[in-house]
Amino acid sequence: MSEEEREPQESHLMDALLRHSLAPDTEAENEELRIRQLMSSLRDEADPYESGRTENRPGRPSRVTWTAIRRWIIVPATTALILIGWLLLPSLISEQRALATVERSLAAEQKPLVRQYQVTLVADSHGANDHPYEFDLFVKQREFVIRAPALRGEGVVWMGGNQDERWIVPRFGPVLTGSEGMLGRWSRRRRAMATPFLRTAAILQRLQRFYDLEMRPPVQLEASTPGGSAVDCDHVIAIRREDSTVVTLPDRVELWADRELGFARKMRVEWSQPAKFGGLTSAVVSLSGTPEVASDFFSHSGHHDGEREVIAGASGDAAVDE
Amino acid sequence: MESLDVFEVLVRENARMVTAYVQSFVTSPAAVDDIWQETMLTAWRRWSDYDRSRPFGAWLRGIAKNNILAWQRQSARAHTMVDHATLDYVGGVFSRIQQLDGDRFEEKLDALRACIQSLPESYRNVVRLRYEDSLMPAAIAGQQGKSLETVKKQLQRARGILHECLTRKLGQLAAES
């Protein structure tokens, strides 16, 4: 590798090492969460009395099985080949079309169009906070903004991110700016609201890698705005592969993608084991509209009057908004 | 001690190192999480293949390397493609770091902290603001009255100096042992 090619890689290496040498506590929190999730998953698998994990999973769409295919192998070769192709082809075509839909949605995420989604989170019904929690999510390419009701009292909290930073504008008090870690720490107290996972692009990327996809017949979704017309959508069901090794992934994802424009109009995400993702059982992300926004909407300055103190590099551990 | 308990102990000893290794190639926090999980779960599923005479950390890095390559192939967002040689080169750096004194990974990075102390003051300041205080470059520029471009260049140059220093120290420590 030439000196020129090596330099960026050396910079990435040093960036990683500097984070661990100068901010080890930040990394420790993330590490502990990963280890707990990992070991919880491994212990669930190892428990011989574990019951109903498969039965609890949301229903799988019907698929061609190898048992059915083997039955036809004893038939004369040419007929067998034709029949195998006939059996396999619809599912292959279905999977290819489903994958194409996901890829088209992901490509649509790159367009500089602001999309507003309503996100509804539902937690384990045995938990204390079992009522749905709703907030608005605005995305444009890699920028995002969340407008969420305050946990106590009236008013909203704004949080978001752009190329330079992540930020939080609480109802009162200083504006916080910092890294993804800051946002993660703050949002974990709000049921995983702002994790990268629930951003549409992150969901779509994972569908490509970790899920079996099936195309369902196209459907019409109701208009997202009053007086608007219904929208034709491609409909994809995604079931997490059994050999998938990322324990926090949802077990089932449904995607409704705009047939004309490509982007996701609605996604429904389900976890069969709420403990794996902060007690959540499902999340629904529905397109509300494509609003025009101010040029500074994806910066914190677009959400306060400029009189507030801005604390850069905040840890997010302060009792913001409470 | 049951296998899973032993595995957990080894995971805890090496978790930070694996994270840092993956972060050397992957910038997205979500992708780092995914690759870390895949690596550890693969390690568990291949637990019976692990040669106990070899360092566990090196074995994990081998699994992580394959997962990073797989992620690159499948991810449209992998801006730069790294090859086996680069992955092995970085793996070698981690191997030398693992041999340093210290129980925990961050303790083994004392050599790097010593290098930071020897940086020119202006570079040392931006490094501390970026990594200790977690300020993004724009915030550092605002605080120090510099342009964003200047701060980015200082960080890049500082990382280059630190890499040379760390490589020298790792070489010296290897020669002494």
Image: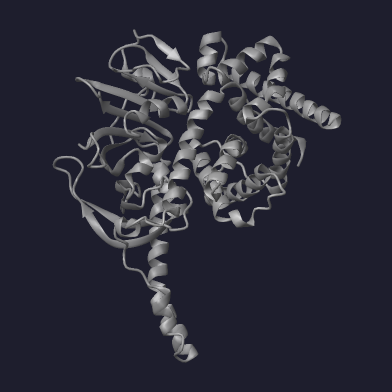
x then y, percent, for residue A122: 25, 41
Most distant residue in the right direction? B175
Most distant residue in the left direction? A227
x then y, percent, for residue B108: 68, 28
x then y, percent, for residue A173: 32, 11
x then y, percent, for residue A189: 34, 28
Quadrant of the drawing holding the C terminus of chain A: top left
| Observer able to see residue A7 | yes
Instruction: From the viewer's perspective, tell me whether residue B148 is left or right of residue B97.
Output: left
- In the displayed structure, would residue B151 be above or below residue A58? above
Q: Nearer the viewer, residue A231 or B93?
A: B93
Quarter assignment of residue B145: top right
Q: Which residue appears at 26% of the width and 32% of the height?
A: A135
Quarter assignment of residue A314: top left
| Observer able to see residue B79 | no
Task: Give the colour scheme shown.
Answer: one colour
- In the displayed structure, would residue A246 be above or below residue B133? below
Most distant residue in the bottom direction? A76
Quadrant of the drawing holding the N terminus of chain A: top right
Q: Nearer the viewer, residue B41 or B67?
A: B41
Instruction: From the viewer's perspective, tell me whether residue A296 is left or right of residue B11.
Output: left
Q: Which residue appears at 29% of the width and 22% of the height?
A: A157
Quarter assignment of residue B109: top right
